[in-house]
Amino acid sequence: MIVERATGAAITRYVDALAALRLAVFREPPYRYDGDLAYERRYLASYASSPDALVVVAIEGDRVVGASTALPLLAHGDDVVPPLARAGYDPARVYYFGESVLEPAYRGRGLGARFFVEREARARELGYATAAFCAVERPDHRGDYALWHRAGFVRRPDIVGEMSWRDVGDRDETAKPMVFWTKEFAP
């Protein structure tokens, strides 16, 4: 297993593999995302266009089996900036941890923790004061957030955003509540 970091334009070589991986993993609960490859490619291309973005990639043989993304909050888009700004965070000082996706056979091997370590290292290298991410909350889902707590993140039920996507089996997109998690870095 190889774990490597790609930044900025170097992310481009992983876009297709990451798009396919995101589609597979996010079909599972709690996301139940019914996405399309074209959207995924466009979304991931935004990471490649940000020089401060990071993708941590887990590779076995010639196959990407896991990945985790991060970039400056202001480079992410309008769905995650407003909730943090309303909560008093300076968006220019927040490094946003996008997603972590890992094929089921590779879970429980420490890769999730490694993804957090690598993204936090990048945030610190770039001088950010805070790291943040958000996760969907569904009434029928009770997540195991032990990894997120061990990585030092605090669940912030007072900071809630919204993202829309089409669930597997649905015709239309619906809005989902996204609860934020934050971690402050010591100066």
Image (spheres, rainbow, N blue to C red):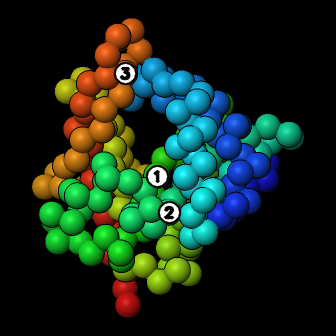
Q: Residue at x 33, y 44 (%)?
A: 135
Q: Residue at x 26, y 24 (%)?
A: 174
Q: Are marks 1 and 2 in contact (CB under 8 Å)?
A: yes
**C-alpha gap between disc 1 and disc 3:** 19 Å
Residue in the foreground of this view, choosing between 107 and 42: 42
Q: In the displayed structure, does residue 124 sit left or right of residue 175?
A: right
Sequence order check: which comes first, mark 1 or mark 2? 2
Compared to residue 29, the image places residue 8 above or below, namely below
* Local SS, label 2: strand
Q: Are marks 3 and 2 in contact (CB under 8 Å)?
A: no
Compared to residue 82, the image places residue 126 above or below, namely below
The picture quadrant where one finds residue 86 is bottom left
Q: Residue at x 13, y 55 (%)?
A: 158
Residue 69 image offset from top left, x and y in percent: 55, 54
Residue 167 image offset from top left, x and y in percent: 37, 19
Q: What residue is pinned by disc 1?
A: 98
The picture quadrant where one finds residue 164 is top left
**C-alpha gap between disc 1 and disc 2:** 8 Å
Residue 159 image offset from top left, x and y in percent: 18, 55
Q: What residue is pinned by disc 3?
A: 166
Q: Residue at x 70, y 37 (%)?
A: 16
Q: What residue is pinned by disc 2?
A: 71
Given the image, on which type of amino acid does mark 1 rest? Gly
Sequence order check: which comes first, mark 1 or mark 3? 1
Looking at the image, the residue that sits furthest to the right is 61
Report if residue 62 is visible in the image.
yes
Residue 177 image offset from top left, x and y in percent: 22, 38
